[in-house]
Image (cartoon, helix red, strand yellow):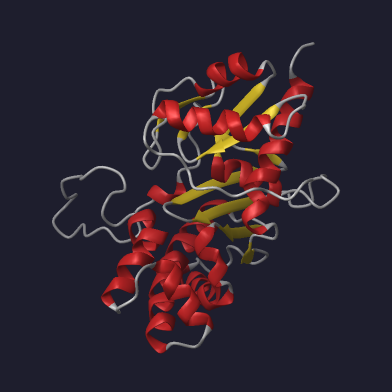
Amino acid sequence: MSKPALRPTEKESPDALVDQLVEAIEELLPADAVGIGVPSVVDFASGMARSSVNIPLERVPLRRILEKRLGIPVFVDNDATVAAIAEAHGPDAKVDVRHLVMLTVGTGVGGGIVIDGHVYRGATGGAAELGHILIGLDLEDGAPEPEGAPQPGSLERLASGRALDRLGAERGFADGKAVVEAAHDGDTAALEALRILGERLGIGIANVINTFDPDVVAVGGGVSTAGELLLHHARDTALQYVLRGVGTRTEIRLARYGPEAGVMGAALMAGQELEKAPE
């Protein structure tokens, strides 16, 4: 596989984003099929985003548009789901983790689930929006008025890259990236921000382990560049909140393919779906 090319996502309009995708894909053609991971709730059968928080793709028939423009089969799925597919496969492209939950911690928090070696998409293709599990909601007086995604108290509101931006701003940093850089240099305030974020993430991981009892919880996404400075707090917190007897074989680790997990998983997904498709 060639080295992934990184570029800022075009967010001005759906048309501009589709044009950007076409341009990026055409640079890599020819191909038998294309796999794409997007940070959206995806109707997998149609390849359309039913909802999309961070990019302008809601209700855009992405699969149909791209197949028409590229002339080859296109498969579209949630970005964290395709990352989970990659993390469940070894370097030989064979499944080596049977039960895996993926958390991608970037601008938002995404989730992907692999059960018994197979990706889990749920009844409608909308699983697994783990960034929207509620880990810090005040229910003392019943359910508060919802505010829209990401809800207050959700994992995404409390433990995403944007949450790290806020924690960093409170401590005089320009953004979350600056926090991570300073933390690697031993800055006390930056390390404290990562501790808070890591412990919040750990509560989310505890919920994941209590629900799925997986072999692996893999943490990827841009914020994972903090490495163990973030993850050891998440791991320690998660293990304190997991029910005794659950998760006894669960490994909580960084995504082994790093930022390439999504690209690798999208390619694997396209290959798998192409094999299943009738000739």
Q: Is residue 256 left or right of residue 200?
A: right
Q: Residue furthest right?
A: 92
Number of numbered discs: 0
Q: Is residue 61 above or below residue 182?
A: above
Quadrant holding the C terminus: top right
The answer to which quarter of the image holds residue 209 is bottom right
Residue 44 in picture, x, y percent from top left: 55, 26
Instruction: Pick the residue in front: 39 or 87.
Output: 39
Who's the residue at 68% across and 48% down the image? 4
- The x and y percentages for residue 143 are 19, 49
In the image, 91: left or right of 42? right
Q: Is residue 160 visible?
A: no
Percent of width and height locating residue 73? 68, 19
| Residue at image point 77% right, 46% down | 2
Identify the image quadrant of the N terminus. top right
Farthest-out residue, left? 141
**Is 162 on the left-hand or right-hand side of 99?**
left
Q: Is residue 63 above or below residue 93?
A: above
Residue 107 x/y as whole percent? 42, 54
Residue pictured at 16% horizontal, 50% vertical:
144
Residue 170 in view (yes/no): yes
* Residue under the image location 51 percent in, 52 percent down: 211
Residue situated in front as seen by the camera: 177 or 27:
27
